[in-house]
Image (spheres, rainbow, N blue to C red):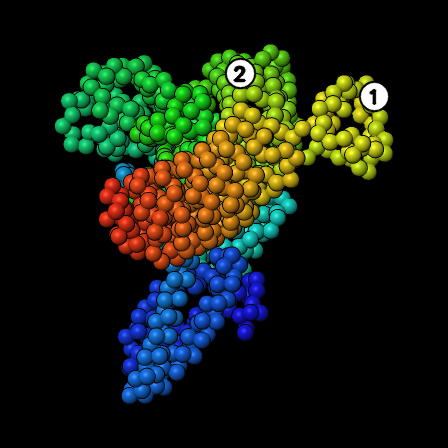
Amino acid sequence: MAAALIGGAALGAVFGEAFSLLSGAVQDAVKEARMFKSILKRLQSTLDSVKPLVEEIRCLNRQVDRRGEEVKRLIEEMNKGKELVLKCSKISWWNYRMKSQYLSKLCELEEDIGRFFQVETLAGVNAIRQNSLVVRYGGVSCAVPRPPDFIVGFDVHMKKLKMQLLKEEVSVLVLTAPGGCGKTTLVKMLCQDEEIKGIFEKNIFFVPVSETPNWKVIVDRLFHHMGFQGPEFQTNEDAVYQLEQLLKNRIEGSILLILDDVWSGSESLLEKFKFHMPNFKILMTSRAAFPRFRFTYKLQPLNDKDAMTLFHHSAGLQDRSSLIPDEVIKKILKLCGGFPLAVEVIGKSLCGKSAEVWYSRVKKLSSDRSILNSDSDLRKCLQKSLDFLDDEVIKNCFLDLGLFPEDQRIPVATLIDMWAELYNLDEDGIDANANLHEITSLNLASLVVARKDASDVGNYYSEDFVLQHDLLRELAIHQSSQEPIKQRKRLIMDISGNNLPNWTEQQRQPLGARLLSISTDETFSSSWFNIEPPEVEVLVLNFQTKNYMLPEFVEKMDKLKVLAVTNYGYFPAELGNFQLLGSLSDIKKIRLEKVSIPSLFKSPVQLKSLEMISLFMSNISQAFRNYIIQVSNALPILKRLENVSIPSLFNSPVQLKSLEKISLFMCTIDQAFRNCTIPVSDALPNLKEINIDYCNDLAELPAGLCDIVSLKKLSITNCHKLSALPEEIGKLENLEVLRLKSCTDLPELPESIRSLHKLSILDISDCPSIRKLPKYIGELHNLKKLHMEGCLRLRNHLPTSTLDLEQLELVTCDEERAKLWEPIKDYLTNLKVEVAEKDVNLNWLPVNDF
């Protein structure tokens, strides 16, 4: 068959052609085949509803190789369906035997198409969700975020800005104003305008730039957003050139490129974005006005009336029946200088407070008589709002947000790990989220909660993020930097290139910081400095290079409890020096993002081709001790080592005996737990929780992980290539939570899970390939919650053993699966079956982000 010869990129095109031919045949047949008019109209309606998905597959905007065999099968079904429809048009009205036969086949065809696209819709949403997470490493998505729900004072500005942008002679327009004036909000508002949407349609691309932009990553993200695989750019200039070629040759219609938060120093490269092509415009927002760009729009602060309206909204005084006199409010607004950010933050800080508190705080605010006409003044104003935070833990939580790079999403899961150890907050994140909501309510950050299903799925926060305005990040850093270097609790280092802070060369005394954050860019060479950080409990490392070495001073961090390593580059990076962690006795939580891990517990060095080694002025007392293989098997040697200390050339692999939690996010991990010379359970004897999220090279869970009997939580989510769980999973006798959310290729659960007698939460939601529940699922006598919404192929009756799930309290599923549970509810009288209203749009994407 023709479909059997299809492969690679051609598959999408052939799929689209087969669909078009079938749709055309159905459309013609509806007019002629009166005997089949009802079913053909229904089939036509189904085809019309899935047409956008077909277009995505045809244009290769969605990978089809993942379900290649199913796609090929459906192509054949559609080709046969086209012939079937043509035959229906020729059947005589009296031929009831043929009518019955063909009617049955048409119903089967409609069911096949509907089922395929039901699964494809879910897989597509998962893919889009993953794509948005991929692009976050260079910033947020290239789609324009939605504006805040409440905006005041921008209508006139929006009309003027639009008028200037649409002028024929304007190709680059700079929107400038001090930080906190609402430049980004105005741009978001502009992009919601019907005229702007009508002109540029889907070709509006929004890119946060920030102080140290990685232009290669930015362009790569634009390629990805438009559905194309970008080449490996050699330089920033090459990236911009390749973007120009893409836009000229592959994108139709008018294009609007928004570069948000551009800093001084980027002018020379920005000039190269002025592509000589019709209907292409650039809108930049910046605190600086760039003289070399001819057209500029300066956003003014709010006038008194609009500032008063915004303040009343932020402070909860909308009904204007407050006991607070207008004169008091006017004093506050005078200090805010018309900056919307200042108005909102201070308004939120006073919301719900007594009149006495208002008078007291106005008095403190008024002690700084400066009019807010600069970022420095604005920071001073905002800093005073922190003085009003009564809860020291919440204040510290806000300051901790400064540990993360500018214009990047901050994972809630990372914050929970940190705060559980620093402030004794609960491990499940309830207290941490309460603090985040408090910070959000004060407008000091924005909490972005991913799409939630019908219930709280075991405190699942993996896809939740925090966003923060860059001025508020500067405020957090400024507040954390008041003491001398060696006395700071938080030490935050942003390194550009290899330009290290001066104090690193002068510092010889131990540092007192409990939290250390080091952010480096793509030009950093991993030539680490030497510092003494014995008090550090939380280490946050942010980088963009293809290869990254953990700093050697990590092994001096005797009190380190939490390590978060995040690659903000576009491709996974090789992580080196992992063995340094083996010397740390207190480390409890490790979170790795976007790194490639060949093996966490790999074999020792073997230099089989080496013929000679020379050791000169070296400390070698431990070099040939504590090894796990015979030296004769590892060497004959050829190397000269001078003036070095060699603890052990052939030492044991890394053992993290105190580690309780490891999180791997968008990592290359298929080999991480393989080829180990010691059992993983010996290397991680006290591990309680494993989180593996968006690790797309994971095809099968390594059986060795199932020997970690201390494990209580195992979460494998959004791993679309996962196709098997080992039978050994039944060994995890202490497992309480098993989460397999959005593993779209997972066909079944092993029967051995019947042995997980302590399991209380099982989440298989959005796993459309699972066709049945395990036969002996009823032996999970402690199971309380089962989440199975999105299990679209689970159509048959439930196993008889489900009647034995006497502790089962909640099942979440879709309407079709809920019917399967109706008979069970007669026996399990405490069971609640909750139908999840699935939201397959993009409402879970970040909104109202500054």
Q: How far is the residue under mark 1 from the one under mark 2?
A: 35 Å
Q: Earlier in the sequence, mark 1 or mark 2?
A: 2
Residue 488 in picture, x, y percent from top left: 49, 15
Q: Which residue is mark 1?
A: 616
Dot 1 lies on which element? strand
Is there any visible trace of residue 505 in the rendered image? yes
Q: Nearer the viewer, residue 187 or 478?
A: 478
Q: Which residue is mark 2?
A: 535
User: On the image, which quarter does residue 267 sit in?
Assistant: top right
Q: Residue at x 43, y 79 (%)?
A: 83
Residue 132 in picture, x, y percent from top left: 45, 46
Specify the amino acid type for callout 2. Answer: Glu
Q: Is 706 rendered above or below residue 725?
A: above
Q: Residue at x 35, y 79 (%)?
A: 101
Residue 490 in picture, x, y percent from top left: 49, 20
Is there any visible trace of residue 474 in the rendered image? no
Q: Nearer the viewer, residue 376 or 406?
A: 406
Q: Quadrant of the N terminus?
A: bottom right
Left-right relation of 310 to 411? left
Q: Residue at x 36, y 58 (%)?
A: 796
User: On the image, which quarter does residue 507 sit in?
Assistant: top right
Residue 569 in picture, x, y percent from top left: 56, 40
